[in-house]
Image (cartoon, rainbow, N blue to C red):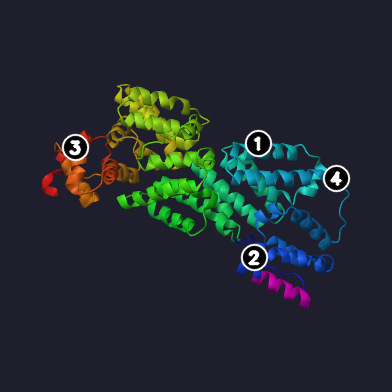
Amino acid sequence: MTPIVGSVGGGDSERATRFTSLYASTFHTRGWREAQPLIEKHWHEFALTEPEVLLDAIKMLPSEALIENPTWLIGVDQLRRAVVGTAPPRSDPGLMEYLIAATRRIVSSRAAGRLPGAVAVAVEAHRALRSAESNDLARLKSTLPHLTIQWSRAMDAGDHPAAIELYEDTYETALLFDQSELARRAASSLAWMYAEQGHTHEARSWLDRGRAIDVSADRYDVPMHLAAALLAIDSLQRDEARAQVASALHLPVDEYWAATLWVRSLLCDSAEDLAHVELDLVGEVLSHPDELTNSGANARYLELTRWALNMPPTTHGAEAAALEHNAARDLIAAETAYRQGSFSDALRRCAPVLAETTAPRIRAGALLVTAASRFRLGRINSGVDAFRQAQALAEHESLLLTFSLIDSSDLHELARLSSRELRPVVRDFIYPLNTPRQRIPSLSRRERQVLGLLSTELSNAEIAEHLFVTSNTLKSTLRNVYRKLEVHDRQSASELARLMGIDRGDE
């Protein structure tokens, strides 16, 4: 387990030096669970004479240790008072005990995948905290960040709207009491939440605040790297995004496993990339309980991952029910209907997520699909109006990848009709100025073979037999070909094959 803060050592005596050396060595070589008993063993030796030695040792423990053993939170308060020479207050410890017990339930429920239960307890704990007397709050302040960071994470994982507010409170309180590692952790999570929603200016602000805190949070920096990667993806800076993903993957992604899959899926540029992410997707889903894959933020990230990989949506009843009223799912359904030519259905699917309160990422996408669908239905003026709104929002938040949700031909015509110029980087990424024949090198040799055979009368099974591959391998290759050519059926792919000059001679 990685420590939250850096060093041990405040006492000057020889015995304090021996203790700090033993503790640090045990911590770094055998982990915090093996080092923690040393604090208990030496408590009475240093608590009154050199409390700063114990205080520094406890500070090295991760927040999980403080939740598993809540007496450390009380002990920290006692040691701090011993350092400054003040007596402990006479007060009812009921509020602290309640909040610590509630936090333990939150952590255990979240780990078991019981997100609704974890969120419910977090909401109750937050309500109790906000209704507490000011005297009680003053005594709790230095302990609170260790608790509220856990409440925030539960609300975040459970998609509760209060998560951002609670993370922000945690950040402010942690800074106030010089708990830099917790402040950085809260800022990191906030950067990710804002980036995920498409509030890119706020995301960058929280990235800057988190990076300005010069402590090593290691594993807790994963959402910071993911936020930076997603911001880079949105602005079409894919090399920077890959570097940030690589940094995240060097750390234990833990609870951000589904978010990591989504970000990785947005960077797939080859069949090999797709295969790797698809394989990891299957493995991660199998290694986590259904409760963690079918509800909350994870369910949304997994659906977005499948969408980015051009995989069919899941049909599992429990998961479908969990995502039924999810705005991201509505956008996915709308884009699918638009790609299939069901433009009226696409408009119907977009309608619920066009509200001003919808997250910018989803709203910009819905406006674009709405614009293209209206355009295809001959409703030119209203289509252009929706496109102008979409472009204004996407440009303001630098959500440039959003423009890829609609066909390049529709995008080109809507931009022309609205008299709005697209950024050169968008034009180059979405519809590069090249001929179909010039795009052939982007297809692998196997993909060109499959594409050439699609224009024949061979069935898919016969094509697989002809190429000596399995049906599943052929399906995967077809999925990649369709994605690269921006088509959704064999006939469209065959027509493009003829335009490209790919025939059976390319085998």
What is the quadrant of residue 69 in the picture? bottom right
Calculate the distance from the C-alpha at mark 2 to the C-alpha at mark 1.
Answer: 34 Å
Instruction: Mark 3 or mark 2: name the one nearer the start of the chain.
Output: 2
Residue type at numbered disc 3: Ser
Q: Which mark is residue 459?
A: 3
Residue type at numbered disc 2: Gly
Q: Is residue 261 above or below residue 363?
A: below
Q: Find numbered disc 2 in the image and state the secondary structure of the residue it sits on.
A: loop
For disc 2, the neighbor class at 10 Å (few under 14, some 14 to 19, many from 20) is: some
Q: Which mark is residue 430?
A: none
Instruction: Mark 3 or mark 4: name the one nearer the start of the chain.
Output: 4
For disc 4, the neighbor class at 10 Å (few under 14, some 14 to 19, many from 20) is: few
Q: Residue at x 25, y 34 (%)?
A: 489
Q: Which mark is residue 120?
A: 1
Camera-nearest label, 2 or 4:
4
Calculate the distance from the C-alpha at mark 2 to the C-alpha at mark 4.
Answer: 34 Å
The boundaries of the magenta stretch are: 13-25
Query: Residue 339 appears at what percent x and percent y?
Result: 31, 32
Residue type at numbered disc 4: Asp
Q: Which residue is mark 4?
A: 92
Q: Which residue is mark 2?
A: 6
Q: Residue at x 45, y 42 (%)?
A: 302
Q: Find numbered disc 3 in the image and state the secondary structure of the residue it sits on.
A: loop
